[in-house]
Structures are given as structure tokens and as C-alpha cells.
Image (cartoon, rainbow, N blue to C red):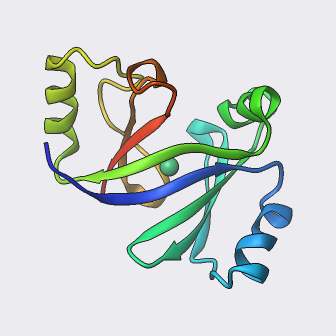
Amino acid sequence: MKVLKIDHLGIAVKSIDEGKKFWTDVLGLELEGSETVEAQKVTTAFFPVGESEVELLESTSPDGPIAKYLEKKGEGIQHVAFRVENIEDALKELKEKGVKLIDEKPRIGAGGAKIAFLHPKATRGVLVELCER
Ligand code: ZN
């Protein structure tokens, strides 16, 4: 598999309106776009930084994965996303290596990207997302 770059950092916030202030007002990043992905009960907002992006994640429902994350750990970095050349090949290779996966097949995330999550147990505590755009 070929990992091309860190695509984005996924940061869980209680509210994008509140949470974005540091990134826009202090760091001067610009909001590229916002999108709700109902299947994942999340609203995302992307802020490009050079070759990568900061992705803020706000839950749309109290039983969504981001709401559960906030309950357990509070606001902060929730996942790191690596862009790969071919996500199907990458997942196949990881499976062959015995890496525990959350998603065995890619699903469609924000911006129409193909995404899949690796299990944090396989990465010593880091929720890793693979994405292909
Ligand atoms: Zn992400």
C-alpha cells in the first residue's frame, strides 16, 4: 500500500461554531466547506492547511460516535487520516497482515471520499482513517 500524506486531523468539538474560533480567528485558517454525513451522525467542517486539513466534527445526535467520544474523552483529536493511493488494496493488505479493522470495506465520507477506519487496538490507541480522494 502507498500512503501519500496526512490528509487531515479529525477533531471532535461540541459545536463547530464555537470550536472553529481558534482555527479561524487565532490561526487564520479558512473554512473550505461544511457537510453533514447523516450515516455517521456528524457534521464536518474542513480547514485547509498546506497539503492537509483540519476537520472539525460535531455530532448531529446524542447517540452518534462523536457524541460518545466527547462523553468519554472530551474535545480533542479524535482521528488521524492518511491518504492512500488505493483504499481497497490498502484494506486487503492490512487484513492479510492481521490488522484489526473497523471497516473492512470503504464507505463514503465527507466530500465523497472513500474512507475506512482501523481499530485503535491495532494502532496502540490511535484511531486511524484511511481515505482516497
Ligand atoms: Zn476524517
Q: Position of residue 120 (x, y in %)?
A: 47, 25
Q: Residue, x 17% and y 53% (percent of image)? A: 85
Image coordinates of residue 94 in percent, x first then y, are 21, 26
Residue at the extreme front: 124
Between residues 89 and 75, which one lies in front from this camera angle?
75
Q: Is residue 95 above or below residue 30?
A: above
Q: What's the residue at 21%, 20% (across, down)?
A: 95
Q: At which x and y percent is residue 25?
A: 78, 82
User: Which of the 4 quarters of the picture holds residue 42?
Assistant: top right
Indicate left or right for 28 with 129 as reference: right
Query: Which quadrant, please, contains the C terminus?
Result: bottom left
Q: Residue at x 47, y 58 (%)?
A: 8
Q: Is residue 119 left or right of residue 58?
A: left
Which quarter of the figure is the N terminus placed in?
top left
Q: What number of labels is visible?
A: 0
Q: Is residue 22 above or below residue 4?
A: below
Q: Is residue 127 left or right of residue 7?
A: right
